[in-house]
């Protein structure tokens, strides 16, 4: 039940975060005078962190659902496998994001 709810919540969070990213990039690309609120939201590392975490876990729990639909019935093992993989990928992406030098 937890994964079902978490998968839906991360889906909604992704819709919201991607909407914020697209909206702010529109304002930053098309306006001569860049709005402060758009610049603040678009360059905020917390927004990017939430986007990375939500995207990775949503993807991995979606893959878990597909594997279960294909007939694998080891739900507890799949939960731990995909949660571990999601944690590793999230950690790697966050390290890359926060240590980039550009």
Image (cartoon, rainbow, N blue to C red):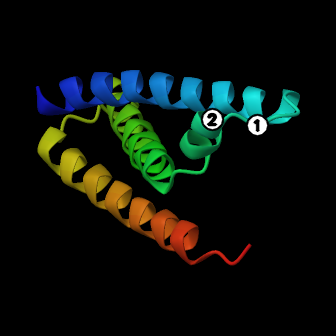
Q: Give the left or right position of residue 74, taking residue 61 as reference.
A: left
Q: According to the image, label 2 marks what residue?
A: 38
Which image quarter is the C terminus in?
bottom right
Q: Residue at x 37, y 44 (%)?
A: 57
Say if 44 sits above or below 34 in the image: below
Image coordinates for residue 90, horizontal then vertical, percent: 41, 59
Q: Quadrant of residue 54?
A: top left
Image coordinates for residue 20, horizontal then vertical, percent: 56, 28
Which image quarter is the N terminus in?
top left
Q: Quadrant of residue 18?
A: top right
Task: Label 2: state its secondary structure.
Answer: helix
Image coordinates for residue 14, horizontal then vertical, percent: 46, 29
**Mark 1 and mark 2: Cα distance apart in space:** 7 Å
Q: According to the image, label 1 marks what residue?
A: 34
Task: Label 1: state its secondary structure.
Answer: loop
Image coordinates for residue 30, horizontal then vertical, percent: 86, 27
How crowded pointer 2 is (Cα within 10 Å; few <14, some 14-19, many 20+) is rated as some
Q: Residue at x 48, y 73 (%)?
A: 95
**Which numbered marker is on residue 15?**
none
Say if 50 sits above or below 31 in the image: below
Q: Residue at x 34, y 37 (%)?
A: 61
Q: Residue at x 49, y 22 (%)?
A: 15
Question: Is 27 in front, or is 46?
Answer: 27
Query: Is the Cβ of the residue at disc 1 closer than 8 Å to that at disc 2?
Result: yes
Question: Is 77 in front, or is 54?
Answer: 54
Question: Is 81 in front, or is 59?
Answer: 59
């Amino acid at each position: 039940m937890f994964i079902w709810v978490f998968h839906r919540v991360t889906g909604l969070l992704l819709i919201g975060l991607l909407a914020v990213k697209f909206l702010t990039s529109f304002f930053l690309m098309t306006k001569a005078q860049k709005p402060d609120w758009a610049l603040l939201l678009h360059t905020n590392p917390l927004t990017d962190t939430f986007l990375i975490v939500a995207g990775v876990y949503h993807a991995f729990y979606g893959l878990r659902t597909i594997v279960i639909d294909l007939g694998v019935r080891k739900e507890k093992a799949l939960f731990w496998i995909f949660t571990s993989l999601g944690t590793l990928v999230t950690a790697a992406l966050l390290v890359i994001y926060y240590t980039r030098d550009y």
